[in-house]
Amino acid sequence: MQHIDQIYIDGVFVTPHGTEWFDLYNPSTEQVIGRVRLADEHDARDAIAAATRAFPAFSRTSKAERIALLHRMADAVEARQPALLDAIVEEYGAPVSRAGWMAAHASSVLREAAKVLHDYAFVRQMGTAQVVMQPLGVAGLITPWNSDAGFICGKLAAAIAAGCTAVIKPSEMSAIQTRIVTQALHEAGLPAGVFNIVTGRGETVGAEISTHPGVAKISFTGSTAVGKTILRAGAGTLKRVTLELGGKSPMLILDDADFATAVPLAIQAGFMNSGQACIAGTRILVPEARLDEFERRVKIEVGRTKAGDPRDPEIAIGPMVSQKQWDRVQRYIRIGIDEGARLIAGGEGRPEGIEAGWFVRPTVFSGVHNDMTVAREEIFGPVLSIITYRDTEEAIAIANDTAYGLQAYVVSADAQRAHAVAARLDAGRVLVNTLAHEPAAPFGGFKQSGIGREYGTFGLEAFLEPKAILGVS
Ligand code: NAD
């Protein structure tokens, strides 16, 4: 039983002013595995004050100093990788294969940021002006539960690289993972106040960070609904915002695709992170003429995709993170059935033989129209929709007919053709015949999938403001 009763402000672990205790669960067993004492608005203000005090000196540190810090942070997080992996599996329920990637990602984002910083020119000549990229100030970093360590380290890496100081508000549901990351980052020995971590509720700590005049920038990853609340809250003080929100990503299977590779790729993209991924390819667009063949292969592939104990290396799909998330996924499966979609795999309830834990059956609907609820709303669980199209024009139209625009996938035997389709998709990233991540490239959404970009140079510039100085020869 973990007992977490400290937050991190001004370089030290302190007892929060907040007095609410929150239960932490193992989603595979539904057992309470810990309790966390939550921070409140008072703690958020203390953290913002510490970050504000640290900013003037930190914003003037050299590139070399910050690169060295980022590497120290990466080393410290890397050293905690085994503990982090265990916590990800226990507290979040990610299958070990996924959890391993997540634990490694937390340190690699810090090293990537160091690389970007190394190559970045903070001062440029534009016409007669010298343009200086200046750090924005105190950054509020608000993160979700579906990749706690990766989001904390990724956002902090960009803020530090830019010369900003930070107040981080992770999800209250990920306190065990957050404690491991906080201890690691503390060991990296950053100046006091440069980063502060206050685990608390969104409506209290998150709301304080989004309205406080001392915060210049918010970088948020989470649901579109909360993203809109934060945008409104930050408008009062015109905060700069980066919002990484939800998705309903299309997986376009072009009519020349080899289904032997396309189907496993589509299933992997749809069920990644147990379906709790903003970039999951949840709308699978299949040529009408080849639907039977596609469905046949999907049934076989899903049959091989096991849900269950995330510690078992054979398992591809772990539990949903909470009872609430389990209920939500069940509700969407019911809606799909009620709206007339045809179940070709999975369905309501738990997978066979599993009595406890927030496990759902890997589910695929076919005969889905793009205007059905399951095709329009983000489910955030392993529930996929197959939608047919007649020709490539219609496929592109369906792919773009969504409120979201985070990621899209194109699968084709002809790379040139796939690229031509990719050029016409409204999505922040289009992956052609691959599921690989590219940390140097921008990541973020069109439309209601967000505002701004993370990673690479775009991610760094999200924490900088250009200043033009004229009249200096
Ligand atoms: P969420 O929006 O409920 O919560 C995210 C964070 O915001 C949490 O820390 C929460 O406490 C905080 N929060 C809640 N209300 C707030 C408020 N009023 N003011 C400030 N902060 C508040 O999201 P979640 O359920 O933790 O995560 C799932 C969602 O995240 C999904 O919609 C998913 O698509 C999205 N997501 C997006 C990306 C991306 O990069 N685009 C990545 C992962 C997850």
Image: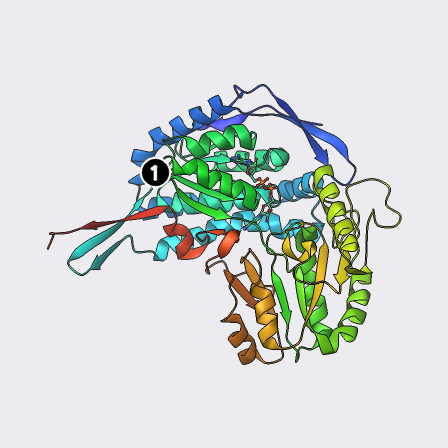
Which quadrant would the N terminus be assigned to in this image? Answer: top right
- The percent position of residue 323, horizontal first and vertical second, equals 74, 38
Specify the quadrant of the image occupied by residue 22.
Answer: top right
- The percent position of residue 62, horizontal first and vertical second, equals 30, 45
Residue at left offset 84%, top offset 50%: 351
Res 123 visible: yes
Classify mark 1: helix, strand or loop: loop
- The percent position of residue 252, horizontal first and vertical second, equals 62, 69
Quadrant in which ligand 1 is drawn: top right
Which kind of residue does numbered mark 1 sit on? Answer: Gly
- The percent position of residue 101, horizontal first and vertical second, equals 62, 53
Specify the quadrant of the image occupied by residue 376.
Answer: bottom right
Q: Front-most of 181 and 329?
A: 329
Horizontal relation, residue 353 to residue 456: left or right:
right
Residue at left offset 50%, top offset 60%: 428
Which quadrant would the C terminus be assigned to in this image? Answer: bottom left
Residue carrying label 1: 137
Residue at left offset 61%, top offset 21%: 20
Residue at left offset 81%, top offset 71%: 296
Relative to 287, residue 339 above or below: above
Relative to 65, residue 473 above or below: below
Relative to 246, residue 80 above or below: above
Task: Rate crowding at label 1 as few (under 14), some (14 to 19) or many (20 or more) other CA atoms within 10 Å.
Answer: many
Colouring method of the image: rainbow
Q: Front-most of 101 and 93?
A: 93
Horizontal relation, residue 338 to residue 268: left or right:
right
